[in-house]
Amino acid sequence: MISETNLPAELYSQYTTIEYTIGDKNQNPVGEFDVKSAFVFVLDTCMIEEEFEYAKSEVKRAIGLLPENAMVGFVSFGTQVQVHELGFSDMSKVYVFRGTKEISKDQIMEQLGIGGAGRRNVPGGAVGVGGYQQQRGMPMQNSGVTRFLLPASDCEFTLNSLLDELQPDQWPVAPGSRASRCTGVALSVAAGLLGACLPGTGARIVALVGGPCTEGPGTKTSGARLEQEKHIGKMLFFKMKNLLVFVSSFLGDYEDSDHFEVLQIISKDMSDPVRSHKDLDKDAAPYFKKAVKFYDSLAKQLVSQGHVLDLFASALDQVGVAEMKVAVERTGGLVVLSESFGHSVFKDSFKRVFENGEQSLGLCFNGTLEINCSKDIKIQGIIGHCTSLEKKGPSVADTVIGEGNTTAWKMCGLDKSTCFTVFFDISSSEKSNAPGSANPQLYLQFLTSYQNPEGLTLLRVTTVTRRWVDSSVSSEELVQGFDQETAAVVMARLTSLKMESEEGFDATRWLDRNLIRLCSKFGEYRKDDPSSFTLNSFFSFFPQFIFNLRRSQFVQVFNNSPDETAYFRMLLNRENITNAAVMIQPSLISYSFNSLPQPVLLDVASIGADRILLLDSYFSVVIFHGMTIAQWRNLGYQNQPEHQCPKAISVEGAMQHLHSYCKAPKEDAQTIIHERFPVPRLVVCDQHGSQARFLLAKLNPSATYNNANEMAAGSDIIFTDDVSLQVFFEHLQRLAVQS
């Protein structure tokens, strides 16, 4: 009973966030199964034997980590797409789809015999599903769940046996050519399978891709190739007939035309390089726009079904992450990019997805976000892994940023680190009075509903209120509310969005103009006197963030491939403020004999011959040994307690101390790696070594070849013409104080 002494939590101002349970665990029953989540693994078979074994091994481990009641399906692809019927455990049963032609959801349902489209009348009055006779009395509804999707506990042995027998794609590859890989068709088939079996249920397509898609829009297939495909299809059916592997029935009727409109990102000719940023800028990537359009339509299908696309790409070449970005982002999927399926970046990250307990990512499904706000505030949009639900209302702004024109968004997948940037318009152009003149308070309310890993549907409501501030009268309160890290992340996300969506956008110039404008407004100075310029402590680190953002991989993209840039930006747009800030401005820790580990400036001056530096740039963790430390380590001093340390280091038990000294950064690096997803790459390097570039590229070039004579003994220089932070700040001061 509500009374003055017994008030609900919602009425206490300190309780800004309340979470409600609005659904039970049995909300998604399908036949005999209580489906809480489903995983369809999509495995690329166009790989060398070693890589293929790595990938299969990790899929096996993942299945063993899944909850017993999690539904599992399996699709493999190479030249063609194979859908494996796990419910038929007596022998291997596969449905094969052509990899050269886009397939609709209805066609997939018909070929797999799922739903009404797949029912066929067979002699004897029984119903044939997928080409075999169904027993009388068996329910037809959701038959695909019992055939293609089974609980992990029921199909683990079958799937492990299937993976043991699975071989790399056998289609011959001509010398100087890339393998025929139909990634787009495989993902389309997996989406159609989930849409037919589990629409509206939390499900993920987990794609392991080992190379670029070479079957796509504009592919020209010769008549000889068509005859070869027909012949191979018939031979497969004949040789494997006793195993009930249906091939020829589902390859489809071959068209007389030699031109197919399907999906690819690159031609099969190895002499044709994969598109670069320069190609995209010059519109010289012939397959890019068609591929993006395909994945955009796939994203819409997955969002309507409530399903997620996760992408694990491992290859030395590009695989098409830039094209698939739209489907991964709009469904709230995960993405990991690595060099090999045997690399720890992939293996440890892939394991984290399926782990429980403290290491769990807290994967949730079927989320929606709705925002309510004061009438003086308009919502421009969101940057993040979500899709607009196109819910119109008076709170929708005329200008759009990211996913806009709505007050509600769909998040098919989200986790503990999911973070969105919401843009509001407070310039009320329809009213002559300033915003908040009638009401000094404003409010924002965020309603997030989602299905947690246990199958419960929760509603989290966050309501915050703030006072309007008239900056023309006093800006002190406005300044005190400025969060420098958050502002830097917002600027990074907005810059990345503009670089992708605005042709000819000059990111560096735009960042500089906005920083100058901010410093001119909130800095303290005398007109035209740069030496008098000072910034309030609430702004003092912001120019440094912008300096590092200008030099980061988010803005300087031409040192990376389009796939790498897409990968970096996807993680920037989904991670929390702490992680995103590290991406922009890495942290640097120094280890020395004379002091405890401590943060140091991200500057080349921090390098010392007797120091070990630990750099955390989020995507990689670098352990950098100074020249003297590297020499001691190479001589094995840390392992020789009888060896005396140089007299300059007067520490009791010097060799034991050296051993601990070398061990400490490794332990700290492992702590960072253990807590992060995706798992960062670990680089161990020495001063003047080839891999020292991983550290030097992130440091402020205060010492270059132009002023090498000024450097301290044991330090280093950077061979670059880039301006240093000091020069950058001097120019900023001069421009900010101009009349």
Image (cartoon, rainbow, N blue to C red):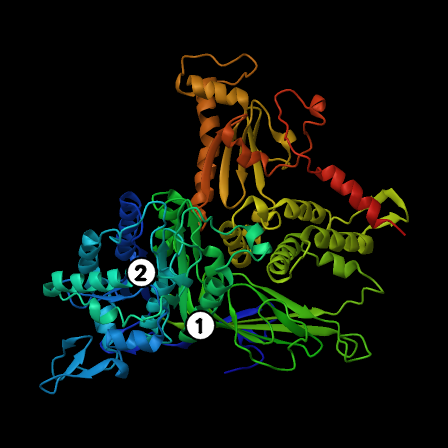
Relative to 22, 476 lies left or right? right
**Drawn side of residue 739 relative to residue 18, left or right:** right
- Distance between the Cα atoms at labels 2 and 1? 18 Å
Residue at screen point 45% across, 42% down: 681
Relative to 243, say whether 449 is above or below.
Answer: below
- Residue 296 pos. (x, y %): 48, 68
Question: Of the numbered discs in the image, which one, if any, rests on residue 78?
Answer: none
Residue 232 in the image: x percent, y percent? 21, 60
Q: Is residue 217 visible?
A: no
In front: 211, or 363?
211
Depth order, front residue of 459/636: 636
The quarter holding residue 124 reads: bottom left
Q: Does any portion of residue 98 appear in the rendered image?
A: yes
Dot 2 crowding, Cα within 10 Å, few <14, some 14–19, many 20+: many
Q: Secondary structure at mark 1?
A: helix
Question: Which amino acid type is marked by label 2?
Answer: Phe
Secondary structure beneath label 2: strand
Q: Residue 180: image x %, image y %?
A: 33, 55
Q: Residue at x 27, y 45 (%)?
A: 49
Q: Which residue in the protein does label 2 denote?
A: 41
How packed is label 1: few (under 14 Cα within 10 Å), some, or many (20 or more)? many
Taking depth in this image into account, of 477 and 91 the one nearest to the observer is 91
Q: Which residue is disc 1 drawn over?
A: 303
Task: Please identify the residue farthest to the bottom as the structure is shown.
Answer: 125
- The reply, left or right, for residue 107 in relation to residue 239 is right
Give the amino acid type for the residue marked by disc 1 in the picture.
Val
Q: Position of residue 380 (x, y in %)?
A: 64, 71
Residue 12 position (above or below residue 64)? below
